[in-house]
Image (spheres, rainbow, N blue to C red):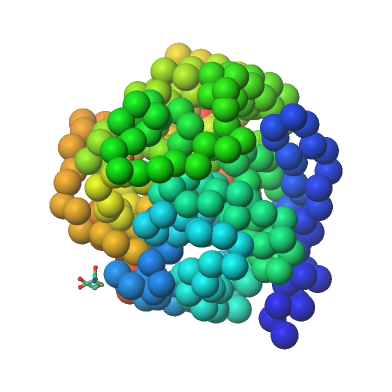
Amino acid sequence: MSFLVFIGSVALCLVVSSALLQRFEEAAKADGSLSFLVIGDWGRKGAYNQSEVAFQMGVVGEQLKIDFVISTGDNFFDSGLRGIDDPAFDESFTKIYTSSSLQKQWYSVLGNHDYRGDVEAQLSPVLTNHHKRWLCLRSFIVNAEVAELFFVDTTPFVDKYFTEPGDHVYDWRGIGPRKTYISNLLKEVDLALQESNAKWKIVVGHHTIRSAGLHGDTDELVKQLLPILQSVSSGELITFSSNGSEIIYGYIHLVHELFKQKYIAIQFFTSGGGSKAWKGVVNWRNPEEMKFYYDGQGFMSVQVTETEIDIVFYDVLGHVLYKWNTSKQLHRAW
Ligand SMILES: *[C@@H]1O[C@H](CO)[C@@H](O)[C@H](O)[C@H]1NC(C)=O
Ligand SMILES: *[C@@H]1O[C@H](CO)[C@@H](O)[C@H](O)[C@H]1NC(C)=O
Ligand SMILES: *[C@@H]1O[C@H](CO)[C@@H](O)[C@H](O)[C@H]1NC(C)=O
């Protein structure tokens, strides 16, 4: 039943498709607001508190009447899906996120662990046809009226997966030649950001740009993607990521940085606490930069209106760990 309701209520349609970035439209609520959850590093067949986090997502999803869910990648551990018939899809997704509030569109990117499996299975239209709420693409855009969301495939940026893959085999079909893939992607993201009139611009990717976790910042993204984000000339930019590290750890943390020189504020949020956690590593930053860090399980909610964005981090029991908000007028007043 809820499945049918979901099909009827979600306005997901393909509008334009350019070389790399497909665009999707998401209708905001009648009052123009939008709410969604963000989760990353999750698919472990319910283990490591994945099911407990899923349950609390259902509760919060209901309270906030969420419009969709964002997955920041590392969707299926340890090595993505083996094919479109891999039972891990049901064991880690369909049978875990069962609450009615989570029967909404899921917008997912790939993490480095996903690249160790059959990448094209996760991206497959066949999978999306069978499971209407599942949508995973490499890079794409969701126009949700009050906010525009830019999903960026970050795994191909990271050199070490190419230079020191170790025992891992990555599925780079569809990427090569890598340099061309990255430069086209950066060009398209740049163009799309420059053209965006959305009040809020939200960039989603798997790897963190700024991070206090085990590996810290992702240098390739700091060098290549961050300058594009910094050149956005208006509005406020928010980035969401997860962490797919070689050493697996789930955590939620937030790094808060302000780039005041162009009256742009870029906020960095990480949500990757969907299952395994408690790595116990944090590279503390200046408190002016990092406002909050938690390395247990949990997830994040986001509520967006024309004038305000509210972000809340929850733990495995649904307790609020941290809240953050910002309003437009404030930044315009500078
Ligand atoms: C699951 O969550 C509980 C409550 O936070 C915690 O005590 C426990 O260690 C977690 N289990 C795992 C495997 O992380
Ligand atoms: C996440 O994992 C990748 C790959 O191991 C690493 O390059 C990146 O810096 C990590 N980010 C964090 C938050 O640790
Ligand atoms: C926004 O955050 C400030 C603290 O930074 C708090 O005083 C205020 O109540 C918050 N507003 C909302 C709507 O949550």
Displayed-image quarter of ligand 1: bottom left
Q: Residue furthest right?
A: 15
Is the residue 220 above or below the residue 269 in the image?
above
The answer to whether residue 182 is seen in the rendering is no
100 relative position to 17: left or right: left
| Foreground residue among 221 and 30 | 221
The picture quadrant where one finds residue 267 is top left
- Residue 300 locus on image (x, y percent): 44, 57
Is the residue 244 above or below the residue 128 in the image?
above
Say which residue appears at 76% left-offset and 78% top-offset.
Answer: 4
- Residue 198 locus on image (x, y percent): 69, 35
| Foreground residue among 246 and 116 | 116
The answer to whether residue 128 is seen in the rendering is yes
158 relative position to 282: left or right: right
Is the residue 100 above or below the residue 303 in the image?
below
Total numbered circles: 0
| Foreground residue among 144 and 243 | 243
- Residue 307 locus on image (x, y percent): 61, 43
Say which residue appears at 70% left-offset and 35% top-offset.
Answer: 21
Is the residue 2 above or below the residue 187 in the image?
below
Q: Quadrant of the N terminus?
A: bottom right
The picture quadrant where one finds residue 206 is top left
Say which residue appears at 30% left-offset and 69% top-offset.
Answer: 48
| Foreground residue among 290 and 221 | 221
Q: Residue furthest bottom?
A: 1
Say which residue appears at 33% left-offset and 36% top-offset.
Answer: 165
- Residue 147 locus on image (x, y percent): 65, 43
55 relative position to 94: left or right: left
The picture quadrant where one finds residue 222 is top left
